[in-house]
Image (cartoon, rainbow, N blue to C red):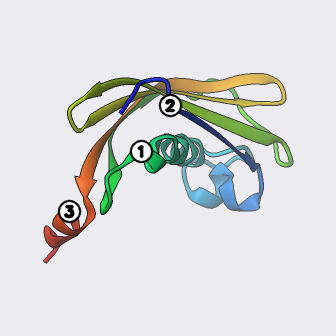
Amino acid sequence: METGLTFTSTVVVSKENIAATMGSGDLEVFATPAMVALMENVAMRAVAGELPEGSTTVGALMNTTHIKPSALGDTVEATAILKEVEGRKLTFEVKAKDSKGVIGEGTHVRYIVDKERFMAKLR
């Protein structure tokens, strides 16, 4: 797998993904857990097409800031860029922005796993 793979996705700030609804705060602004989930999703999708059959990636580390609020109705865009590949370990640069600029950024680590073997750990 080559570095440089990237993916971008957007979400509209709605009642479902605000801090007051998600329980991470009591304000009607885009929730930090929603931003982190969006960042994880774009990282997962950046490499999904390059994985061996039967494999997926799982999140292991998220080191990010959430520096500005985003209002109801605004659109948040997150982008992940694959920066480093060390065996099964994938390190991404992640960034989120809204109509006013960057709202969060950081580093996200995912690992390539075999789906069946990973889920067998639950049995």
First along the sequence among labels 1 and 2: 2
**Disc 3 secondary structure class:** helix
**Disc 1 secondary structure class:** helix
Q: Which residue is mark 1?
A: 50
How far apart are the two marked residues, 1 and 2, measured between alpha carbons? 9 Å
Would you say 19 lies left or right of 105 here? right
Which sits in the foreground, 116 or 122? 116
Compared with residue 92, is residue 57 higher up or lower down, i.e. above or below? below
Mark toward the viewer: 1 or 3: 1
Label 1 environment density (alpha carbons within 10 Å; few <14, some 14–19, many ≥20): few
Q: Pointer 2 and pointer 3: residues touching (CB < 8 Å)?
A: no
Position of the N terminus by quadrant: top left
Residue reaching furthest to the bottom: 123
Compared with residue 53, is residue 62 higher up or lower down, i.e. above or below? above
**Disc 2 secondary structure class:** loop
Would you say 62 lies left or right of 81 here? left
First along the sequence among labels 1 and 3: 1
Q: Position of residue 71 (x, y in %)?
A: 81, 41
- What amino acid type is highlighted by mark number 1? Glu
Q: Which residue is mark 3?
A: 118
- What amino acid type is highlighted by mark number 3? Phe
How far apart are the two marked residues, 1 and 3, measured between alpha carbons? 19 Å
Hey, which quadrant is residue 102 in on the image? top right
- What amino acid type is highlighted by mark number 2? Leu
Q: Which residue is mark 2?
A: 5
Compared with residue 17, is residue 121 higher up or lower down, i.e. above or below? below
Q: Position of residue 81 (x, y in %)?
A: 51, 27
At x 30%, y 63%, the residue is 54
Q: Pointer 1 and pointer 2: residues touching (CB < 8 Å)?
A: yes
At x 47%, y 49%, the residue is 49
